[in-house]
Image (spheres, rainbow, N blue to C red):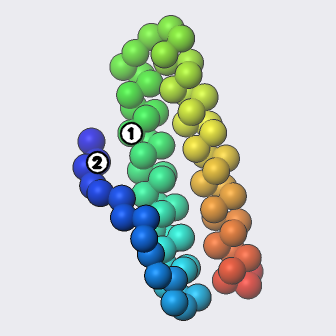
Amino acid sequence: MCEHTHDHHHDHSSPEETLALLNYMLGHNRHHAQELHELAHGVEGEAARLLHEAVDDLARSNDKLERALAVLKGE
């Protein structure tokens, strides 16, 4: 399991730093989605269904982050 702290006080002083942070966050979120997917296979019933739905929701959010990155990169 991933253990880390979340510092939400960032100074985005440049577009490059913003891109780097978004890129990092996208990878970080994908890692968490994979962890949740694995957890979902360890439980049954309603809990498993809800975890799989949460993974799907995270995937949609990550797709939006990826598109935002592409826009910021001018792609």
Which label sits in the foreground, 2 or 1?
2
Identity of the residue drawn at 44% across and 75% down: 10
Identity of the residue drawn at 38% across and 28% down: 39
Mark 2 lies on residue: 2
Image position of 3 (left or right of 35): left
Q: 10 Å neighbourhood of mark 1: few (<14), some, or many (≥20)? A: some
How many marks overall?
2
Identity of the residue drawn at 69% across and 69% down: 68
- In this view, which residue lies farthest toward the top? 45
User: At label 1, which amino acid type do we have?
Assistant: Glu
Mark 1 lies on residue: 35
Q: x, y percentage for residue 63?
A: 66, 55
Q: Are marks 2 and 1 in contact (CB under 8 Å)?
A: yes
Q: Work out how far the residue at label 2 is from the one at label 1, CA to CA, in angstroms.
A: 8 Å
User: At label 2, which amino acid type do we have?
Assistant: Cys
| Mark carried by residue 73 | none
**Looking at the figure, which quarter contains the N terminus?**
top left
- Of callouts 2 and 1, which one flags the residue occurring earlier in the amino acid sequence? 2
